[in-house]
Image (cartoon, rainbow, N blue to C red):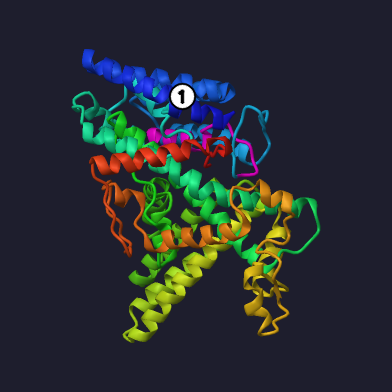
Amino acid sequence: MLAFSFSLYYFYLFPLSLVVFYTLRSINNKLALPFLALLSSVFLFLVDWESFLLLTALVLMNFIFVQSDNRSKLLQTLFISLNLLPLMLFKTGIVALDSQSSFSVGFNVLLPFGLAFYTLQQISAIIDTNKPDVKKMSLWQYIFFSFCFITLPSGPILTYRQAINEYKQFNHRKIRYNEIALGISLIIFGLAKFCFIALPINQYTELFFLSLEQKLFTLTFTESLYVMIGSILKLYFSFSAYSDMAIGMGFCFGLKLPVNFDSPLKASSPGSYMNSWHMSFMAFIRMYVFLPLFLLTKNVPIKSVQTRYTTAWAIAVFFSFFLTAVWHSPSDSMIIQGVVVALLLVSIELLKKTSATEPRQFITRFSQALSRLITLVCVFITGLFFFVPSSGVAIQILINIVAPEKISVTSLLCPFIEEFHLSLFDCSSFFPSLDSAQQASAFLGPSWAILHMAFVVFIVFFMPNSMHIFNVSRSVHLSLFNITWKRTLFFAFIMALIFVFSVSMLSNVQGFVYG
């Protein structure tokens, strides 16, 4: 139902709503935003009416609160807690909705549609409106801010302060055809990323997870490595694809949404990775969690100023990572893993701070290389635990990688392997644990799947990201190639071809909701 709703909107309602939107803008600019607010409400109701009722009640409660001028810290804390309560109840499984009306594809927990992103935006509204320099929204603005059909499914997160600045310019912003062309191109590019990169990887990882649940067998080294790498890559390309589409839709409606990704797998440290992955969420954590905690803990009674500030930094970073794990995690075990990862990442960052003061260049380079390696290992292992049916399966997959019993390869490589008499290799297929029927149901055969994975890894580490390609933002990470989109007939033709091929794969598309 979710995938159907997205397809229905993107390919039928979106062009129609765009025509209505610009018709209203030509008549009266002030009619455009109420139309978007109404459209967002209808979209949420059609996708998940139970979520709509829950969020509507919270929106009305919050709107009344943020409009009031005199608010105590205690009352502000109470309202923040009330907005967090539904998310906590659904995350812990104390409350659950009918699986046919709730969607959280990619996680093992059912959440009301958009609740995770909605909650963070409402918290930003409660905090920001308590500051004298922030203006109040009208009811229509607040409804669109809360129910925005562009960002509610998978982000990016638009804080109250960012939104009010956007709305202030919204009624006076002229129609820019270059931004509309850019937006449509981003939507097509995001759809292609999901269909041609995330979907083929997801098909095989899901087949492996299903087989592991139904059968008792050990995956080969090749299969285990594919599952571990594929788990994080399908999440990255699914999430970044929807972020591209959301930012593109924002451009089409005259809204500038924050960038969400900057090639995170190119990062050389945990801090760089976290600041490049889900950037709007990390900006929220930095503003509303890290900074207040750092300012609070830097006053701890420690004589040495450097030690005091380093301690405050470590505490703030740990709790920022911990709360990030809690927000993303569907179970208690994942939260425990989040604590372990948070401790590890803080230790790595402290190691980098120490090595930065070390005069010997060799040690500095070694620590940077070690930091990058540990960061990638942590990312891929965390992604594995995020998607596998159970922790036991994840541990078994890791054992298969570290101490493999078999390395599976295609039969085409058998002559080369047999020449060296290597009994460790299985020459039947890259994926011998899957039967022929399962392999036939996948979009790509095993050999093509391995080549596809190698190509995707090349894209991740050596190609520029979509925000860089479309000149939305510049990347802090280097790329081997430089590709730049332009509003020309050549790029229009390329985008048209990509769109046609992407639509042809829509029958295989699954819904994706992050958080």
The quadrant where residue 340 appears: bottom right
- Is 186 situated left or right of 215 in this image? left
Count the numbered circles shown.
Answer: 1
The answer to whether residue 60 is visible is: no
* Image point (80%, 54%), residue name: 215
Q: Nearer the viewer, residue 60 or 158?
A: 158
124 in the magenta segment: yes
Q: Nearer the viewer, residue 213 or 331?
A: 213
- 361 versus 247 height, above or below: below
What secondary structure is the stretch in magenta mostly built from? helix
Q: Quadrant of the N terminus?
A: top right
514 in the magenta segment: no
x, y percentage for residue 178? 22, 35
Q: Nearer the viewer, residue 366 or 324?
A: 366
The quadrant where residue 333 appears: bottom right
- 445 versus 48 height, above or below: below
**Circle 1 is placed at which residue position?**
59
x, y percentage for residue 181? 27, 35
> Residues in magenta?
107-128
- 365 versus 375 height, above or below: below
* Image point (52%, 20%), residue name: 45
- Is 147 situated left or right of 137 in this image? right
* Secondary structure type for disc 1: helix
- Is 437 situated left or right of 315 in this image? right
> Quick one: label 1, few (<14), some, or many (20+) residues within 10 Å?
many
Q: Which three-letter amino acid code belongs to the residue tagged 1?
A: Val
* Image point (34%, 71%), residue name: 306
- 39 versus 79 height, above or below: above
The answer to whether residue 78 is visible is: yes
x, y percentage for residue 147? 44, 26
x, y percentage for residue 206? 65, 49
